[in-house]
Image (spheres, rainbow, N blue to C red):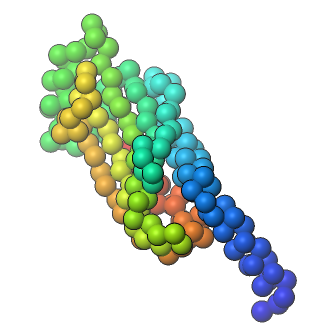
Amino acid sequence: MSENYEELMKQVGDSVKAQFGNQKGIDAFFLYVLDGFAHRYIKDDKSSDAVIETLKPGVYQASTVTVSMKKALELVDESKKAELTDKIKKYIIEQKPTTIFQIKVDTTQLNENGKGKVIGYSIINWDFPIHANIDNGLMMEFTHEFEDWDDIRKNFPLFLEKVCETF
């Protein structure tokens, strides 16, 4: 291989190490990517601004509250459609029911080199008015094994694409 290619690969490796060299850089990466996906998949003209947050070290979430259950009704499977329709009829008009849409990522199984499993969740919660019971909603879980921080930098957005197919 040419010296230019080897030098370029060293620069890329150094850049990745610098970005993921401390927890602040790691948090910034995951929150930045989540923010982009939140605006693309769960934010719409009827929803609140996306809230992007670190729930605890290594666990990140993007969420919006939508003042409509229509989108949730379009996304659920037939087995939960009747339950959601009944809830809509019960609360419609006078109470303005809401649905919470969330993208959640758990990176706590990654080691210091970025190797390990990441778990992603897509969540639609229509348990209005409290939103405490996920049984009144839909939660899909996805996992992916990453080899290192460079693999995460390249493939984490592709993993989130899979997670967000629910929406």
Residue 104, percent across and down?
A: 40, 47
Residue 21, percent across and down?
A: 63, 64
Above or below: residue 35 compared with residue 121:
above
Q: Quadrant of the C terminus?
A: top left
Q: Quadrant of the N terminus?
A: bottom right
Residue 94, percent across and down?
A: 27, 7
Residue drawn at (84%, 88%) of the image: 3
Above or below: residue 151 compared with residue 32:
below
Residue drawn at (69%, 64%) of the image: 18
Above or below: residue 116 compared with residue 72:
below
Residue drawn at (30%, 19%) of the image: 97
Q: Is residue 131 visible?
A: yes
Q: Is residue 29 visible?
A: no
Residue 147, percent across and down?
A: 50, 75
Q: Outermost residue, bottom direction?
A: 1
* Viewer-side residue, 59 vs 133: 59
Q: Outermost residue, top direction?
A: 94
Drawn side of residue 112 relative to residue 163, left or right: right
